[in-house]
Image: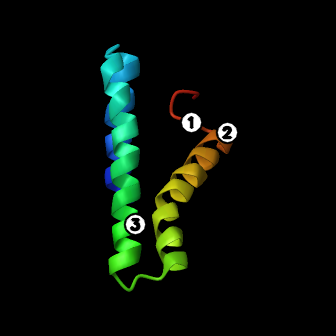
Amino acid sequence: MAILNFRWLWRIVEKVFFEGKKFHAVQAFFKFIVLVFVIFCILRFTEANPIAFVVGISTLLSGLLFEVIGESLRTERKGNA
């Protein structure tokens, strides 16, 4: 679910900022509403542990953050020989 959310957000950002289609910004609000509804349904109608659910969802974001920090701290890069 986190990966789908990330890809959907990337497509919205791509449309709004790179193609100049401002109407797609409404999709960000719609995406938020859908995401809140899906999370509510998962926590309400399944036996999922809320703490484990939040930790599992946040692993994608924390993994991306650590990768960006690691790449920015590397002194040796492909373009800087």
Give 22 or 64, whichever is nearer the viewer. Answer: 22
| Numbered circle sitting on residue 40 | 3
| Numbered circle sitting on residue 77 | 1
Q: Can residue 1 be seen here?
A: no
Dots 1, 3 in contact, CB < 8 A: no
Residue at (63, 40) in percent of width and height? 72
Q: Position of residue 77 (x, y in %)?
A: 56, 36
Apparent side of residue 35 relative to residue 68 in the rendered image (left or right) = left
Work out whether 58 lies above or below 73: below
Q: Can residue 25 be seen here?
A: yes
Give 70 or 66, whichever is nearer the viewer. Answer: 66
Give 61 or 5, whichever is nearer the viewer. Answer: 5
Question: Between tags 3 and 2, which lies in front?
Answer: 3
Give 78 or 66, whichever is nearer the viewer. Answer: 66
Work out whether 57 lies above or below 67: below
The C terminus sits in image quarter: top right
Task: State the SS at label 3.
Answer: helix
Q: Quadrant of residue 36?
A: bottom left
Residue at (51, 69) in percent of width and height? 54
Work out whether 16 lies above or below 40: above
Mark 3 vs 2, N-terminal side: 3
Mark 3: amino acid:
Phe
Q: Position of residue 73 (x, y in %)?
A: 68, 43
Apparent side of residue 17 relative to residue 69 in the rendered image (left or right) = left
Q: Quadrant of residue 44?
A: bottom left
Dots 1, 2 in contact, CB < 8 A: yes
